[in-house]
């Protein structure tokens, strides 16, 4: 009989522990759900607050203005970069022509009058 009481007590203890753990987990989940609901209620209240909505609208408007300004700056930068490339190409062309001219007019005594096209100097 004593073995039966010990086995029964062990089984009841295990069942009691399982029930206590189950109840504790259920209570904890219920508490977490209640807290999440309260947080959602407060968050929705804060989001629906008029001053906060106005601030959000103002920030979105400022963001749109800044994005437009950034786009304009990017367009200006691209145009400036094209102009810089053009000036650099013209500068390189002028350097090339100067080098060609130096090669042609190395002997100034002979070529310079012909370059001017003045026949009197040539005679």
Image (tube, rainbow, N blue to C red):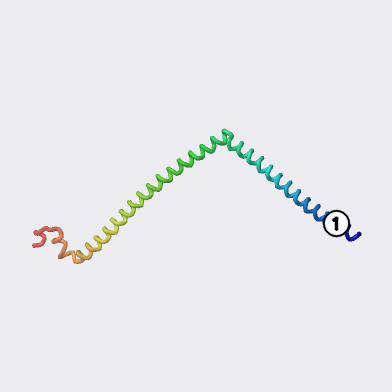
Residue at the location (12% across, 58% down)? 117
Q: Quadrant of residue 86?
A: bottom left
Instruction: Please state the horizontal and vertical placement of residue 102, each as a whole percent of the image.
Output: 23, 63
**Residue 119 against residue 48 in the figure, above or below:** below
70 vs 2, nearest the viewer: 2
Mark 1 closeness class: few <14, some 14–19, many ≥20 residues within 10 Å: few
38 vs 51, nearest the viewer: 38
Question: Quadrant where the C terminus lies?
Answer: bottom left
Q: Quadrant of residue 107?
A: bottom left
Q: Residue furthest right?
A: 1
Q: Residue at label 1? A: 8
Residue at the location (66% across, 41% down)? 37
Residue at the location (38% across, 47% down)? 75
Element carrying mark 1: helix
Residue at the location (33% across, 52% down)? 82
44 vs 25, nearest the viewer: 25
Instruction: Please state the horizontal and vertical placement of residue 17, each as a whole percent of the image.
Output: 80, 53
Instruction: Please state the horizontal and vertical placement of residue 53, each as a whole percent of the image.
Output: 55, 36
Instruction: Please state the horizontal and vertical placement of residue 113, each as a whole percent of the image.
Output: 14, 61
Question: Quadrant where the N terminus lies?
Answer: bottom right
Decide if residue 51 is on the left or right side of residue 72. right
Q: Quadrant of residue 106?
A: bottom left
């Amino acid at each position: 009989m004593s073995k039966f009481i010990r086995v029964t007590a062990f089984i009841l203890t295990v069942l009691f522990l399982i029930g206590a753990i189950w109840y504790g987990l259920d209570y904890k989940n219920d508490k977490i759900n209640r807290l999440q609901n309260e947080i959602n209620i407060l968050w929705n209240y804060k989001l629906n607050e008029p001053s906060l909505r106005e601030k959000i609208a103002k920030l979105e408007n400022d963001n749109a203005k800044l994005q437009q300004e950034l786009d304009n700056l990017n367009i200006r930068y691209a145009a400036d970069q094209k102009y810089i490339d053009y000036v650099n190409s013209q500068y390189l062309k002028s350097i090339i022509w100067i080098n060609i001219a130096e090669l042609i007019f190395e002997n100034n005594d002979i070529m310079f009058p012909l370059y001017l096209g003045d026949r009197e100097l040539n005679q």
